[in-house]
Amino acid sequence: MQKMQLKIYVFLKIALPVLICAFIVQPAPRLFAETVEEGAIREGKVVFYCGMVAPDVRALADGFNKKYPQVKVEHYRAAESKILEKLLTEKRGGKTFADVLHMAGIWTGVYKKEGLLRKYASAEAKVFPKGFTDPEGFWTTYYNTYLTFIHHTRLAPRKDLPKSYEGLLDSRWKGKIGVYNDEFEWYMGMLEYMGEEKGKQFMRRLADQDLVLRGGRTLISTLLVAGEFPVALGAVHRTMAEQKEGAPVDIVPLSNPAMASMRAIGIHANAPHPNASKLLVDFILSKEGQTILNRINRHPVRSDIPVEPAVDAIRRNLFPIGPRNPDLLHNYKKEYEKILLRR
């Protein structure tokens, strides 16, 4: 009896207070699930594989870090083909470093086929125009490069310009049209816009115009300004930047839509920082992120972002160069080289 009383005394005197203290210091159970922002702060960083030039990536990252200073943005910058090559190498090695991925629109099917993307339906994407988001939710276009024909205003005055794509086939433009020698994406967009057979016929006739083929859109634009040819296929954002510097260049006012070369954003299937990935994607697609892209001459996709009148006119008459079947891309590439480059 005395032993039982001693045990009870020891329990009440020593063990019970310890148990009570342990219960008191336990944190209260969380009533709500962790938010994306809280998860991102816990993860601490996000890695962005991007094809934009470094200063442009930095502009986006700075805007994000101003809003979310506790989440560091790290980026790997390379050409889009190199980004895909790196991702596939990492996949074969069983490693994942990237969180958020930049992709050319035509290659998004390859990313999906390779299992590199996870679904994420950002609320910000709901306001994006049809054709610029993935119906399955794997990617969203976050900016466009508008491809259309431009002209030297003194060598090709406005009154002499073609009114449509077919007008470029007039004999007066033979040997006078500059084209970047790797406009494969534009070629595919035009075939989709015109229809396969009509598009190929147009491309053959365009090639008969003795195109002045050069390596790089920047070089094509530079040579047009220098007067090497009066008309060229160019990028609108570069043309407008040259206009502001006083160059004699302008956009040919065609009745046909400009081709929208889409640049998409998505989250890696095995993103190490999933919450920070969502937060960065949301920011880039938001009005705030799209405004930054507009400021650095990357044409935003959101229609509620004010742009210059000339860009707005083009934006209202666009044809998106959408994703392609991954198994057919190589065939299109060979076809482009055979028809346009005469290889």
Image (cartoon, helix red, strand yellow):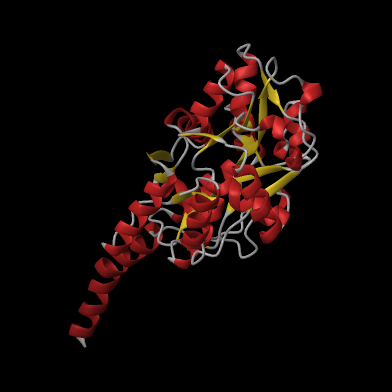
For this orientation, the residue located farthest to the top is 246
Is residue 211 something that shows in the picture?
Answer: yes
Residue 27 is left or right of residue 197, and the answer is left
Q: Which is more toward the observer, 202 or 239? A: 202
> How far across and how far down the image is residue 37, in percent?
52, 48
> How far across and how far down the image is residue 300, in percent?
65, 38
Up the image or down, 269 lies above or below 188; here it is below
Residue 311 is left or right of residue 284, and the answer is right
Task: Work out which quarter of the rendered image holds the N terminus and state it.
Answer: bottom left
Q: Residue at x 49, y 39 (%)?
A: 181
Up the image or down, 118 lies above or below 253; here it is below
Up the image or down, 170 lies above or below 13; here it is above
For this orientation, the residue located farthest to the left is 3
Question: Where is residue 152, by image quadrant?
Answer: top right
Q: Which is more toward the observer, 44 or 31? A: 44
For this orientation, the residue located farthest to the bottom is 1
Is residue 124 something that shows in the picture?
Answer: no
